[in-house]
């Protein structure tokens, strides 16, 4: 017979919750997330949130979030037209030095009539090669331009979830910010 009181372990609870989120079907997590998104005012920024778009967004961030509340923070950058920059990230990665290369990338992306993950990825890699850069030298400024943050899911997954128009808009916004 045990005589000591039970011990509540909050870290274990977070781990169990994170595992539950990871194992649950994305559509189920998306439905559970919807009221929290509404409470955070995020659904006001997107006229129509399709169930499939939200489930796709959940797939992108579910490995990083331990709770649905935390997931709201992870998905915040994918709502609305404009991006809100983390000041530290913008100062570090959106500098006048990256304006020409971001401009070249934007010009290439604008020539594609629709978003194609493969086409955009090839154009991105080709530009990195032509400029003699490392992938991260372009990827980080683009990530900050698109999400306002230095951490995100895969860059081309981010572009896919944002779609062509918002990706181009946010790249322009990033260039404008870097030009200051």
Image (cartoon, grey):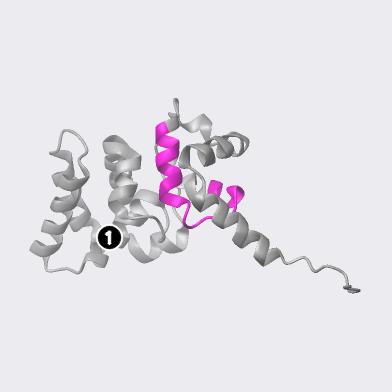
Instruction: From this view, report whether residue 76 is shown above or below residue 152.
Output: above
> Looking at the picture, how far across and down is residue 133, in whole percent?
16, 68
Left or right? Give the position of 174 relative to 64. Answer: left
> Looking at the picture, how far across and down is residue 38, in whole percent?
59, 33
Q: Main secondary structure of the magenta part?
A: helix
Residue drawn where x is 31% and y is 62% of the image:
140
- Is residue 175 at least partly visible in the picture? no
Residue to which mark 1 is pinned: 139
Number of callouts: 1
Which quarter of the image is occupied by the C terminus? Answer: bottom left
Closest to the observer, 13 or 118: 13
Q: Quadrant of residue 150?
A: bottom left
- Helix, strand or loop under label 1: helix
Closest to the observer, 125 or 178: 125
Closest to the observer, 45 or 24: 24
Instruction: From this view, report whether residue 116 is shown above or below residue 46.
Output: below
- Residue at the outermost front position: 1
Determine crowd level at label 1: few under 14, some 14-19, many 20+ residues with C-alpha closer than 10 A. some
Residue drawn where x is 45% and y is 48% of the image:
84
Residue drawn where x is 18% and y is 43% of the image:
109
What is the magenta range?
52-73
Q: Quadrant of residue 9?
A: bottom right
Left or right? Give the position of 133 relative to 63. Answer: left
Closest to the observer, 5 or 119: 5
- Residue at the outermost left position: 130
Residue drawn where x is 38% and y is 55% of the image:
153
- Based on the picture, tell me whether residue 64 belongs to the magenta stretch: yes
> Looking at the picture, how far across and down is residue 34, in whole percent?
56, 35
Which quarter of the image is occupied by the N terminus? Answer: bottom right
Q: Quadrant of residue 138?
A: bottom left
């Amino acid at each position: 017979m045990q005589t000591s009181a039970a011990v509540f372990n909050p870290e274990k609870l977070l781990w169990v919750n994170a595992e539950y989120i990871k194992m649950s079907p994305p559509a189920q997590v998306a439905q559970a997330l919807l009221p929290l998104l509404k409470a955070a005012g995020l659904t006001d920024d997107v006229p129509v949130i399709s169930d499939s778009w939200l489930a796709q967004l959940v797939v992108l961030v579910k490995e990083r979030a331990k709770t649905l509340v935390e997931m709201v923070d992870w998905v915040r950058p994918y709502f609305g037209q404009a991006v809100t920059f983390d000041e530290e990230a913008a100062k570090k990665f959106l500098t006048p030095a990256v304006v020409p290369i971001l401009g070249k990338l934007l010009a290439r992306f604008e020539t594609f009539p629709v978003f194609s993950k493969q086409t955009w990825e090839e154009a991105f890699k080709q530009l990195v090669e032509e400029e003699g850069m490392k992938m991260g030298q372009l990827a980080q400024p683009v990530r900050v331009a698109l999400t306002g943050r230095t951490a995100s899911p895969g860059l081309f997954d981010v572009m896919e979830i944002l779609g062509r128009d918002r990706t181009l808009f946010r790249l322009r916004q990033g260039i404008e910010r870097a030009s200051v």
